[in-house]
């Protein structure tokens, strides 16, 4: 027997799918974007988006009378594993989680215009390095590390199995979407 789970406390599903479906002792939660229900918007930073997507997931799971500890599998879609954020956002949002910012790039002259290490075999001597590629107002963020740190707060013990993939684009230009399967 199939039971549709819906709550107004999480982003609404379109006509084409449900927020979640319960089938016996199993719960299948559709992918949750990081839409903040207080204002209907997606937070600006990746860290805030991760928290919001996980909160939305948790809200639906709890609406079905399940808990995060019942989750056996998640699938996570990230728009990218690495990115750049404004330095002021790092200081405001990431610093409490990751500590003082340390530039992982170091000597920019070792990197090409795409931010990758130069390799003599592949380097193009005719192209000059664009020093403006690394904006002083931005900082490099390892989104995968940030994601894992926050994710572990929602699954502190016996975390579920998980797949995590980078995709070309997510709806509403979100940076993350998470779906889950839970079993009681």
Image: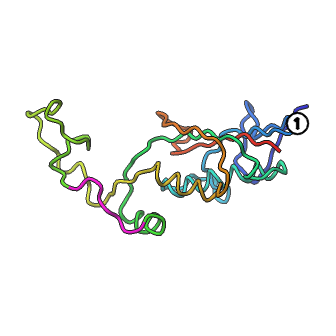
User: Whole-percent x and y of residue 5?
Assistant: 82, 42
Q: Which of 176 and 81 is in front in this view?
A: 81
Provide the residue designation for mark 1. Answer: 24
Report whether 109 appears left or right of 17.
left
Q: Is residue 184 shown in magenta? A: no
Which image quadrant: the C terminus?
top right
* Residue 172 x, y percent position in the rendering: 55, 41
Locate the N terminus by quadrant: top right
Please, is residue 15 above or below residue 134 in the view?
above
- State the extent of the magenta-drawn residues as a range: 99-106
Against 1, is 148 above or below? Answer: below
Q: In this view, does 138 lie above or below 81?
A: below
Q: Which residue is drawn at 15% across and 43% down?
A: 129
* The quadrant where residue 119 appears: top left
Q: Which residue lies furthest to the right in this view?
A: 1
Dominant SS of magenta comes to loop
Q: Which image quarter: residue 16?
A: top right
């Amino acid at each position: 027997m199939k039971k549709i789970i819906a709550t107004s406390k999480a982003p609404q599903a379109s006509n084409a799918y449900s927020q979640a479906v319960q089938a016996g002792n199993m719960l299948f939660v559709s992918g949750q974007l990081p839409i903040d229900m207080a204002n209907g918007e997606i937070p600006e930073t990746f860290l805030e988006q991760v928290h919001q997507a996980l909160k939305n997931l948790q809200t639906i799971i709890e609406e079905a009378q399940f808990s995060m500890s019942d989750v056996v599998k998640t699938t996570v879609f990230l728009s990218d594993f690495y990115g750049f954020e404004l330095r002021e956002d790092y200081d405001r949002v990431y610093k409490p989680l990751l500590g003082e910012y340390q530039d992982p790039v170091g000597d920019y002259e070792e990197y090409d215009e795409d931010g990758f290490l130069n390799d003599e075999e592949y380097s193009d001597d005719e192209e000059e390095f664009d020093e403006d590629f690394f904006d002083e107002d931005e900082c490099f963020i390892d989104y995968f590390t940030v994601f894992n740190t926050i994710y572990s707060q929602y699954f502190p013990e016996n975390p579920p199995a998980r797949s995590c993939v980078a995709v070309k684009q997510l709806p509403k230009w979100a940076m993350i979407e998470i779906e889950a399967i839970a079993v009681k």
